[in-house]
Image (cartoon, rainbow, N blue to C red):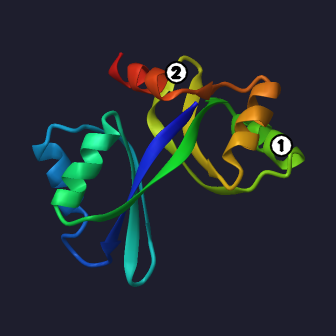
Amino acid sequence: MKTKQISVFLENRPGQLSIPCRALAEAGINILTLSLADTQQFGILRLIVKDWQKAVQVLKDAGCVLNVTDVIAIEVPDRPGGMATILEVLERAQLNIEYMYAFTFRRGDKAVVVFRFDELDKAIEVLQTNGINVVGSVELYDMYEN
């Protein structure tokens, strides 16, 4: 159910984003989805790739400072109110969302959104109990490739 996410810490100056992207490209590692958040002094590039262990080594070899965390991917109805429905379930369970971002592909009539929670296992249990599909890593990679 959990998916590994790589967070790369970057200086907030021109050219820094291309370093990890170029390193992954040269290693033949495709980025499935990404998010970039910044502050005045640094940015955090969050990535999901299929071969995360290889990506970690490639990025370390390129001099990147990084962290690996668990996130979950959730199917969200791709219609007005779809996200609101998911958020209502999470609010009722008192789950805190630390951040989220979406994949660029759809799964039928559903979007796939990545969530990071402070209580990941509780979030998985609550979502599944409420009939919300939490997409496993293997399934996620297969969806992207097909």
**Secondary structure of the residue carrying numbered label 2:** strand
Comparing 27 with 56, the one in front is 56
**Secondary structure of the residue carrying numbered label 1:** helix
Residue 61: x and y in percent read 16, 58
Residue 22: x and y in percent read 15, 53
Residue 41: x and y in percent read 38, 83
> Image quadrant of residue 111?
top right
Residue 43: x and y in percent read 39, 71
> Image quadrant of residue 124?
top right
* Residue 126 sits above or below residue 90 on the image: above
Considering every residue shown, the one lying at the far left of the view is: 26
Question: Quick one: quadrant of the N terminus?
Answer: top right
Considering every residue shown, the one lying at the far bottom of the view is: 40
The residue carrying mark 2 is: 107
Name the kind of residue labelled 2 in the image. Answer: Arg
Between disc 1 and disc 2, whose residue precedes?
1
- Which residue: 21% across, 75% down? 14
Question: Does residue 32 appear left or right of residue 80 in this picture?
Answer: left
- Which residue: 15% across, 52% down? 23
The reply to whether callout 1 and callout 2 are in contact (CB within 8 Å) is no
The residue carrying mark 1 is: 88
Question: Does residue 64 appear left or right of residue 109 in this picture?
Answer: left
Name the kind of residue labelled 1 in the image. Answer: Glu
How far apart in space, not on screen, are marks 1 and 2 (Cα)?
22 Å
